[in-house]
Image (cartoon, rainbow, N blue to C red):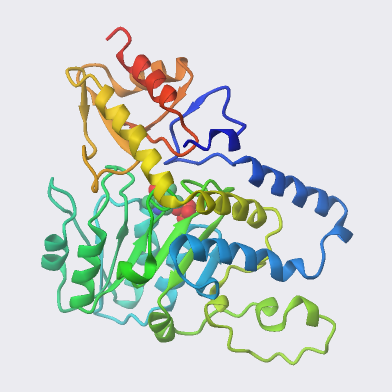
Amino acid sequence: MSLRLQFDGLDERVWLNCAHQGPLPKPAVAAARRALDQKRSPWRIRDESFDEVPRRLKSALGRLVGVPPAEVILGNSTSYGLNLLTQGLPLRSGDEVLLIAGDFPATIYPWLPLQDRGVVVRLVEPGPEGLTAEFVDASITRATRVFCCSWVFSFTGRAIPLAAVAQVCRSRAVTFVLNCSQALGARPLDTPTAGIDALVGCGFKWLCGPYATGFAWIDPEVRETMTTPPAYWLTHQGAADVERTASYELHPVGAAAYDVFCTANFLNFPAWTASVELLVDQGIDRVAAHDQRLVQRLIDGLDESDYQLLSPRHPPERSTLVYVLHRRVPTDEVHARLSLAGVETAIRDGKLRISPHVYNEPAEIDQALDALTSEN
Ligand SMILES: Cc1ncc(COP(=O)(O)O)c(C=O)c1O
């Protein structure tokens, strides 16, 4: 069921590097072109669009993760959502934030400035079996207030046992913040039953949006504990009221208080909305099944006398990030060979990362396998 026909920019190369960036589908490109046309002739941007643009994106993201649109917080990155949490959660000196050593830097950095006010940021490293619920349970101390990690780890391709980890955090009264950037779009998520307290992610990978897009969701109970929400004038006043003498009153706006400023990001958000709608209309379960068929084909076709598979072999730990290492040939040579054959992959941590998504066809996996096996 590949969505290949909806992605018309991929004819020259085989793009097996979605963990880096996803391509824009046709409807998103059309939306971006419309936005450029509107900005060339600004009278085409209607006042109502200031409300419509964020509302439609929130609605698409709400469908994607199973939360009411009003609870979706619009951002420009994963880091945006994480910084809202690091700056807003009521963490005090002596409180501990638990993180995973080796996680992607975007998951770690936002917490580090908290050390200036005495918050302990502790990094723990799981064993070779990866992150387990038991490991999280054993790592939590009486001081732990927050546990934050990626759903799928960028440098190993391993997915965490989400439900079990969430259950541990809940039973130990620890706020669980999940970075879904390397997973959402390729794995379904039902936020209300997932047991997480906050979710952050970017739009430009598996959600096939433009760069500088992201979102967050924060459980309303957690949000209530957060200090001093930001205040953006358009959120409190509204574009239609702009001529009225300002009353400068703060209104109860809920999660919208945390939206990134200039929420009607006319160039980026309509395009991203089109991408998310395309995926959600297709059904993330179907997208995930397609992606996993491609991953299975890749793993099945790998000559393991030459290549070591480093990422998990089987679901559910297996993700759409496949890591391999040639047993004799340096990774940059293998990478260059693939590139010469028109196949785009990535090198991370000295290992080859291959990450297919919904626009890829089985024949493209075969093309990659051919290049991987040619003249060892
Ligand atoms: C796990 C993870 N989180 C976040 C990001 C990107 O972070 P941001 O959207 O803040 O630039 C990446 C990019 O590779 C990532 O792998």
Query: Is residue 322 placed above or below 364 in the rendered structure?
Result: below
Residue 52 picture location, percent across and down: 70, 67
Q: Is residue 363 visible?
A: yes
State the quadrant of the C terminus.
top left
Residue 264 picture location, percent across and down: 69, 65
Q: At 37% across and 71% down in the image, what residue appears?
A: 192
Which of the 4 image quarters holds residue 302?
top left
Residue 371 picture location, percent across and down: 37, 15
Q: Is residue 349 visible?
A: no
- What is the tally of numbered marks visible in this picture? 0
Residue 47 picture location, percent across and down: 81, 70
Query: Is residue 89 placed above or below 30 in the rendered structure?
Result: below
**In this picture, residue 108 sits left or right of residue 34:** left
| Camera-side residue of 293 and 139 | 293
**In this picture, residue 341 sits left or right of residue 149:** right
| Camera-side residue of 232 and 172 | 172
**In this picture, residue 10 sits left or right of residue 29:** left
Residue placed farthest to the top in the image?
A: 375
Q: At 67% across and 67% down in the image, what residue appears?
A: 262
Q: At 43% across and 31% down in the image, what residue appears?
A: 16
| Camera-side residue of 179 and 248 | 179
Q: At 46% across and 32% down in the image, what residue appears?
A: 360
Which of the 4 image quarters holds residue 240?
bottom right
Which of the 4 image quarters holds residue 338?
top left
**In this picture, residue 308 sits left or right of residue 60:** left
